[in-house]
Image (cartoon, rainbow, N blue to C red):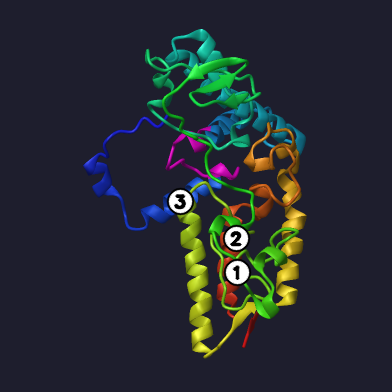
């Protein structure tokens, strides 16, 4: 639940310069399992970390093994999901409908959703949930949706299937990208993305990528895009200062980053394997290079942002060819 409310103007006036960046960093650290003295955002995303902190404080010692920490994280996760399931019972009046709406998976197996009106919609007299028990719709006729052999007549169908993810970059972009010697990006990335830091790929000079492409993914998407734009702007500025005509990833730079991605993606593999099917784990088949998290830097967003900042500070454009 969001619990949206008007912003207190006195609180807004009390904020010091730089508060946005401080809050974004604080959020990223917390939702990726790091420690912060204070939770500056205090929303549904960071709540599980507060649960974990409480468990850690009650632990018999401060030197838990990785196995003990994993058990604590799972318990904190369970407690959070019990809160979510309890809220369904509190809001939805019909017990059968409430039972069908309860999520039974770990919090970050799916994209957490926060809404103040969604659950209460099922209390309206003109709304009925049809539970397909995971089997989906049998078929659609001229005037009805058929589920379990029963036809539900409708005037309008809204296909709320979400957005497309896990498919090829060019499919989602809506156009093909052609590089040197007529090679297409679809051909180049046939076995999965290959980039330098997620921004450039060998054989496609002066071409930069933003979004979900081997970088530091964060639930705060604008934060990620801002960091990406700063990095690309730096590279373009350096290329202009050198009066370059082309700039692209070197073979060595790309290979090194792909190896780093492969090495670190095992960090989250066990968790994803135990999740219910979804786009985070390629519908239950993680590790294939096509799920959302397979295409992200396994050390987390703040570590990735530090890597590209240090790369810029070093100043030699390591892994990039300028022509």
- In which image quadrant can residue 190 be found? bottom right
Residue 109 in picture, x, y percent from top left: 63, 35
Q: Earlier in the sequence, mark 3 or mark 1?
A: 3
Residue at the location (42% across, 55% down)?
A: 21
Residue 133 in picture, x, y percent from top left: 63, 19
The magenta segment is: 30-47
Is residue 261 covered in magenta?
no
**Which label belongs to residue 177?**
1
Tell me, yes or no, if residue 211 can be seen here: no
Q: CA distance from mark 2 to mark 3?
A: 30 Å
Q: Earlier in the sequence, mark 2 or mark 1?
A: 2
- Residue found at the far bottom of this picture: 243
239 vs 18, left or right, is right
12 vs 223, left or right, is left
Dot 1, how many residues are within 10 Å of its Cα: few (below 14), some (14-19), or many (20+)? some
Badge nearest the viewer, 3 or 1: 1
- In which image quadrant can residue 269 be found? top right
Residue with the mark numbered 2: 170
- In which image quadrant can residue 179 be found? bottom right
Q: Are marks 2 and 1 in contact (CB under 8 Å)?
A: yes
Q: Is residue 243 above or below residue 62?
A: below
Q: CA distance from mark 2 to mark 1?
A: 7 Å
Q: Viewer-proximal residue, 160 or 192? A: 160
Q: Is residue 194 above or below residue 26?
A: below
Q: CA distance from mark 3 to mark 1?
A: 33 Å
Residue 70 in picture, x, y percent from top left: 71, 34
Is residue 43 covered in magenta?
yes
In terms of secondary structure, where does tag 2 sit? Answer: helix
**Which label belongs to residue 24?**
3
In terms of secondary structure, where does tag 3 sit? Answer: helix
Dot 3, how many residues are within 10 Å of its Cα: few (below 14), some (14-19), or many (20+)? some
């Amino acid at each position: 639940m969001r619990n949206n409310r008007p912003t207190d103007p006195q609180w807004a006036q009390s904020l010091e310069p730089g508060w946005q960046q401080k809050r974004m960093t604080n959020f990223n650290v917390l939702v990726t399992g790091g420690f912060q003295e204070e939770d500056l955002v205090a929303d549904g995303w960071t709540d599980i970390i507060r649960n974990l902190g409480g468990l850690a404080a009650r632990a018999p010692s401060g030197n838990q093994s990785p196995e003990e920490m994993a058990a604590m994280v799972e318990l904190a996760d369970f407690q959070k999901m019990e809160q979510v399931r309890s809220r369904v019972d509190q809001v939805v009046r019909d017990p059968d409908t409430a039972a069908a709406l309860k999520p039974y998976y770990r919090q970050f197996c799916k994209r957490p959703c926060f809404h103040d009106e969604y659950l209460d919609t099922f209390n309206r007299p003109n709304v009925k949930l049809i539970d397909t028990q995971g089997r989906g719709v049998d078929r659609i006729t001229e005037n009805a949706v058929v589920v379990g052999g029963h036809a539900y007549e409708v005037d309008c169908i809204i296909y709320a299937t979400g957005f497309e993810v896990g498919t090829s970059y060019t499919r989602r972009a809506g156009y093909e990208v052609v590089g040197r010697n007529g090679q297409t990006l679809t051909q180049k990335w046939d076995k999965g993305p290959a980039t330098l830091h997620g921004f450039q790929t060998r054989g496609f000079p002066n071409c930069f990528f933003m979004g979900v492409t081997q970088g530091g993914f964060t639930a705060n998407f604008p934060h990620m895009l801002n960091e990406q734009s700063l990095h690309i702007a730096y590279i373009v500025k350096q290329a202009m200062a050198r009066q370059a005509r082309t700039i692209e990833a070197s073979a060595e730079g790309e290979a090194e980053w792909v190896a780093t991605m492969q090495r670190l993606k095992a960090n989250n593999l066990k968790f994803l394997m135990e999740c219910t099917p979804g786009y985070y784990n390629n519908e239950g088949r993680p590790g294939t290079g096509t799920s959302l998290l397979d295409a992200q830097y396994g050390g987390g967003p703040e570590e990735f942002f530090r890597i590209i900042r240090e790369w810029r500070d070093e100043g030699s454009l390591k892994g990039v060819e300028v022509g």
